[in-house]
Image: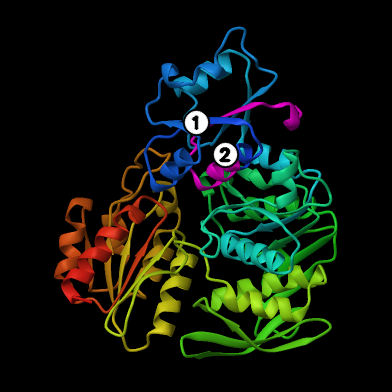
Amino acid sequence: MELNKIHSVYFLGIGGIGMSALARYFNAMGKRVAGYDKTSTKLTDELIAEGIDIHFEDHIRNIPKYFKELPYDTDNILIVFTPAVPLDHSEYVFFNLNGFNIKKRAEVLGMITQSAHTIAVAGTHGKTTTSSLIAHILKSAGLDPSAFLGGITQNYNTNLLLSSSLKSNNQPPTTNNYIVVEADEYDRSFLTLYPEIAVITSVDADHLDIYGDKNHVEESFSLFAKQVKSKLILKKSIVGKVNAELTPITYAVNDESADYFAKDIKIENGFYKYTVVTPVAVYDNIIMGLPGLHNVENSVAAVAIVCELNISEDIIRNALASFKGVKRRFDYHIKTDKLIFIDDYAHHPEELKAAISSAKEMYPGKKITGIFQPHLFSRTRDFADDFARSLDLLDECILMEIYPARELPIEGVSSQMLLNKMKSSNKSICQKNDLIEEVSKRDIEVLMTMGAGDIDTFVESIKNELLSIEKI
């Protein structure tokens, strides 16, 4: 179907971070946009304020009339859904039975980007920060990019950047438009993308409910790599895991055999300072405001992309220094001499390890207390031992019950099972209703909330409780 002929777009699961970016895109393109989501959130509130019609009860009567006027205008109406929406959802069933164009979010993103100069960021970790940083550097260079992001950038307070040319033309992008996208491996979604240039940051086992095993994860990333048209950039350590037709450009931290690498890394006044070596130049004394060695690595990936686009050192240097990060990625909510409170999206053992290690590195000698909400029964089952090892890095661990998302419970899989595998003696399980009281009892120095479920809905209450206790 031709996107420029679509006049109305309906989203099933509109409140998701990727879906909401698409909704904002079509709204900006002058289309009529509406949708359903299970729960009201700050993000859905923002979409409503932007003029998008959203409801939270699954019922055909709630679908706006212009989507179901007889005869149904199925040629000019697009229905977008996320795999989190069950196939027996009454609104999905209605659209399906009546012959509407129904497409997954990834398919629609592929349609939007097929004619653009697309820059894709793939990988089981680091996608959101790396893609947001690339978009920030491109904007700093005056290249007027669009970007579909998997998080809310702190610099622009949105998950969608839209170029001025797209805003003014209300037409699908062309080769003159740079578009930065996250290439999501879940459900093999990234196989709908054929980017001009791409980076793959990691290929750790994840989503084994979809892939079955690590070999199939790597196979899928190899298929994606073969769809890259011009330049493929790989983290040096995964070169042997991804088969590609293009000769890869490599990046790394503290590995001088890579084409792009960081060295001489140190922390000064709470900031990372390091040298980036490129194939043609050496950038001394780069300053990065984001904590964590993994973010230094993400920055090298971004530098590799933009150097291949011939962006100058001065622009890159200034953009790295001014990048504020992404909400829920090592996101500070309290930062004083007495107390630190950080919220992070980490939901895979490697992400937990990176986030906790970053906190220990930034705040040596301080007690690190973590509240973790496991996400998905299948992920908890598949990586239980790895989760336990990562959580044992904490000085204190508070586990919440597993957030099921799209899944039904699996017998024998629980937070108690995870707790039993941990070696730490400072560990406990806390129910949602007791969480704020539990925090109030603790002697907190550095607190981290981590997870991809609804743990973020507790952040403001935790912050207020900590501030009231400390009288900061």
Residue 325 visible (yes or no): yes
> Residue 403's spot in the image, x, y percent?
35, 48
Give the label on residue 23, or none: 2
> Residue 32's spot in the image, x, y percent?
59, 29
Q: Distance between the residues labelled 1 and 2?
A: 9 Å
Question: Quick check: 154 above or below 279?
Answer: above
Question: Quick check: 187 above or below 333?
Answer: above
Do the CB atoms of the residues marked 1 and 2 lie less than 8 Å apart?
Answer: yes
Q: Give the range drawn in magenta.
A: 1-24
**Mark 1 packing: few (<14 Cα in 10 Å), some, or many (20+)?**
many
Residue 125 visible (yes or no): no
Residue type marked 1: Gly
Q: In which quarter of the image is the C terminus?
A: bottom left
Residue type marked 2: Ala
Task: Looking at the picture, tell me which residue is in the foreground, 133 or 183.
Answer: 133
Give the label on residue 292, or none: none
With 57 as the anchor, is 110 left or right in this view?
right
